[in-house]
Image: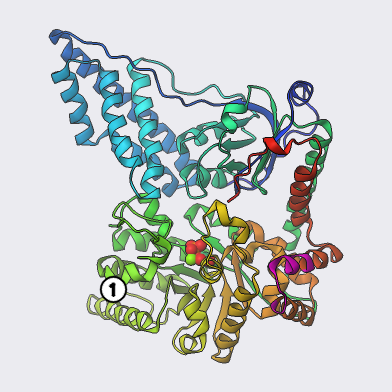
Amino acid sequence: MTDPQHHSDTATSTSPEETASVRERPMRAFEGLGVAPGIAIGPIYPYSRTTHDVEHREISQTDVEDEIDRFKWALSKSERDLKKISAVTREKLGEDSASIFDAQIMMLHDEALREAVLRRIQEKRCNADYAVKQVMTEHRRRVQSSDSEYLRERSNDLLDVQERIITHLRRGKLLSKVDTESVIVAENLTAADIVLFSRRDILGVALDFGGATSHVSIMARALGVPAVTSLHGLADEVRHGDTIILDGIEGRVILNPDADTLDRYRTRRERYRRVVQEHKQLVPLAAETIDHHEVSLRGNLEFVEELPLLEEYGADGIGLFRTEMLFLMRGRFNYSEDDQYEVYRQIVESVRPATTTFRLLDLGGDKMLPVAHREHNPFLGWRGIRILLDREEVLLPQLRALLRAGVHGPTRILIPMITQLDELHRFREYLERAKRELTEEDIPFADDVPVGIMVEVPAVALMADRFAAEADFFSIGSNDLTQYTVATDRGNDLVSDRYEELNPGVLSLIQRTVEAGHAAGISVGVCGEMGGKPRNTPILVGLGVDEISASPTYLPEVKRVIRALQFSEAQALAEEALNSSSEASIKAMLDTWLDEHGCGLLHMISSEASDEAAASPDVDASTVDVQQR
Ligand code: PEP
Ligand code: MG
């Protein structure tokens, strides 16, 4: 695991590439999705993964056997490649990440695909390259038209496998000749590409497609390569060697920056590097206000490979482990109890004596498995606990595995998407059943694992006192709570400016939840994205949340804000926010506070960048593709 800044700090002076394009091509900015933090400045390496032009050749009956042998040979070569990539990934990132390539190896062994290719060669007497392309393209089309985002993203893996086989059929070399210390610009990449590129010290990655949950984004974060995706159209605009600025914090790239912009971003890169360094000094300090009001700062994790980040950024255990990612990486529901137990045990042992909070499988919404049912409004559909209560064959093995893991260190269970009390009652029946069965089978388990609920549906916040009497802790899922409260899809570009986490209505529900939780003597945390944004920290502290759980890299900056606050001051800011008429006025108030207290450096880096790029007379507004999330 590398520092997120590792790759972006290497360029320190103006290189010939950086200045050449300044003279020749106009500066242009593209907005996308920042999926891995950091700032990279350097020459572009345009990477094209255009598919091989494969021509149809009719072969004679006597050549059929040769063609089949060639196909089998290409399969075995492809398998050898993938095993190598899988081994590198395993070494750098661990078992789970390597499983992506194991899945690609399994595609090579897919009997149905193999048979289809062989049949085509034999019956249609066509060349193997053509047969492979035909069969795999058909298969990919089926996958791409699936309703499942997860499956659609896996179609890249199929393309990767197809290209690999065809390349070997032509005895070509697959390893791309990427320039070292360049910013890769491509329509799309596979996870395998980025693992290979990382060996050439790339500075960053800018892609036309890809969401935050696509494998390539996951790999970029894990490898510490700054990345921006969803830049629709960028790949068509770039030339080899042109200069690019990539801001993985803001989700922006600037092509052919002028000298002033380059200077500004170099300064910003330096300041960001300083902030990252300063953060390290905050790690051993307590997360408490000037007048000693403590807030527990915990990490949101999705992969085992992220565990070292907890210590690196000073997290007090895990406030949210999204277990669905473990399932999604495997691409199937049937994850055995024993296999799950092994992973959970490893996590608990690594985090103890601090606590690990495992959220039960939260599928649905934008996180579907291949078994997905078609839904018009998936965020209002079969999600989280609703699925689990309908699928005891999924719920029970996970529950049993978590109870068993609880023997090895402090463990909490968190239930997603609870809407009504009855769901909690039914869940508790399953919990008792799991415990009863484990007892009968003489399998050790922890009997006292606290069970908390995600507060992410407004109905729960409104009835928080009733839930508080029956839950062991609350964790506010502000991502969903916001979308359901302000009726704005969290993933819809068209309304992203209306998605207001600081909307007074959302804040009022948080306040209600905290008050009810405290009246019942249970702790209340926030684990949605709003917890990781330092601008929101005074409000959350002022509303009285006991715990903030966020991606570990964000915790030091949040801690910096907490340490600059008086608790009474935070309460006054929260009160003012609750009485405000718009989110814009709340943000303005908080920005003023951050500036006055000199603790919004990271935030300043980001917002200055956005203001300057937007306001810069050198950036032609008509050429700025706005593709914000
Ligand atoms: C949330 O909704 O705030 C949350 C933490 O859960 P997720 O983002 O996984 O839906
Ligand atoms: Mg949620």
Determine the image quadrant of residue 178: top right
**222 relative position to 580: left or right:** left
> Against 285, is 495 above or below?
above
**Residue 545 drawn above or below residue 259:** below
Residue at the image position 77 percent from the left and 67 percent from the top: 590
- Rendered location of residue 352, percent (x, y): 52, 69
Q: Which one is in front, 564 or 437? A: 564
Residue in front for this viewpoint, 79 or 140: 140
Question: Can you give x and y, in whole percent of width and height, for residue 576 in the image?
Answer: 75, 78
Any part of residue 199 in sight? no
Where is residue 11? Give x, y as percent. 74, 33
Counting other residues with Cα less than 10 Å from the Cα at mark 1, is it few (<14), some (14-19), or many (20 or more)? few
Residue tagged 1: 443
Cβ of mark 1 under 8 Å from ligand 1: the answer is: no
For the point 69% across and 37% down, the residue is 622
Q: Residue furthest right?
A: 596
Q: Is residue 395 above or below residue 34?
A: below
Residue 551 in the image: state x and y as whole percent.
59, 59
Segment tinted magenta in the rendering? 578-589
Magenta stretch contains residue 238: no
Q: Specify the quadrant of the image occupied by residue 591.
A: bottom right
> What colour scheme governs how the chains and residues are painted in the rendered image of this protein?
rainbow
Q: Is residue 66 left or right of residue 545?
A: left
Three-letter amino acid code at disc 1?
Ile
SS assignment at label 1: loop
Question: Quick one: 401 or 590, which is closer to the camera?
Answer: 590
Camera-side residue: 171 or 512? 512
